[in-house]
Amino acid sequence: MSVFDLPVNVTRYEAWFKKNPSVFESEVAAIKELLPGGTGFEVGIGTGIFAEKLGIRMGNDPSGEMLKIARDRGRLVYHCKGDCLPFHDGFFDYTLMVTTICFLDDPAAVLRECGRVTKRNGAIVVAIVDGNSLTGKSYRSCASRSMFYRDAVFYSVDQVKKMLVRTGFAVDNVRQTLFGPLTGITEVQPSREGFGEGAFVVMRAMRN
């Protein structure tokens, strides 16, 4: 059983965003910068907190407890893993993953599946906590003591870019936000191009 299948942990997950609204809104703003138009699908939609803000109607997640809240947010959800999505080839204009790739047993399999259900010349948008950032290193150092991060792998931007290329995508834009300690972020931060300074990095890649 995943930690995200326990109702108490789902409550803690939601509470974190309420406690850190400027961090959350900064992340949302950075994703919006790179989000394409058209019909999208969020892989690992969780409670739907990002999908609701971003106007994404559909998503999947293996946690039934998280999907209960996503349904309450009006999302159309599918209780399944990201490597086996119930859609035909090229169904979506784009797919999105927000801090999901670090929890995947087989990221390449999920990225290939995203490529399958995304239209040719469509896009995937992947948002991560950069494993090379101070925040990423801090999360990694305390992962064994964390309920949420004990099984997570905090990849670097270069590692994720290589995964995207190997699974049929071409990265065309990267933006970053969350500059400085998260506890000190009290206003929404504008994103910047590139990576290496911000803890939260958003990559857009086009399907070949």
Image (cartoon, rainbow, N blue to C red):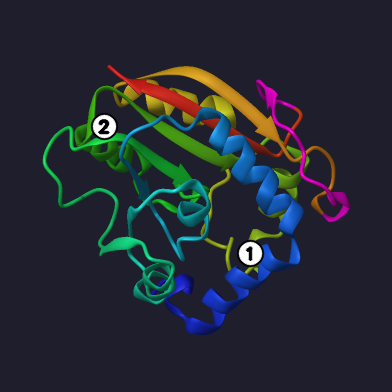
Rendered view: 155 above or below 158 = below
Residue at 52% of width from left, 75% of height from top?
A: 10
At label 2, the amino acid type is Gly
Q: Circle 1 is placed at which residue position?
A: 144
Q: Circle 2 is placed at which residue position?
A: 115
Q: Nearer the viewer, residue 39 or 103?
A: 39
Residue at 74% of width from left, 46% of height from top?
A: 135
| Position in image of residue 22 (x %, y %) | 75, 52
Secondary structure beneath dot 2 equals helix
Rendered view: 137 above or below 145 = above
> What residue span does the magenta drawing correspond to?
183-196
Rendered view: 110 above or below 122 = below
Is 110 covered by the magenta stretch? no
Is residue 41 something that shows in the picture?
Answer: yes
Q: Quick check: 139 left or right of 167?
A: right
The image quadrant where one finds the C terminus is: top left
Q: Quick check: 49 left or right of 207?
A: right
- Please tell me the numbered disc located at residue 116: none
Residue at 64% of width from left, 60% of height from top?
A: 143
Residue 72 falls in image quadrant: bottom left
Give the label, 1 or 2, closer to the camera. 2
Q: Nearer the viewer, residue 170 or 42?
A: 42
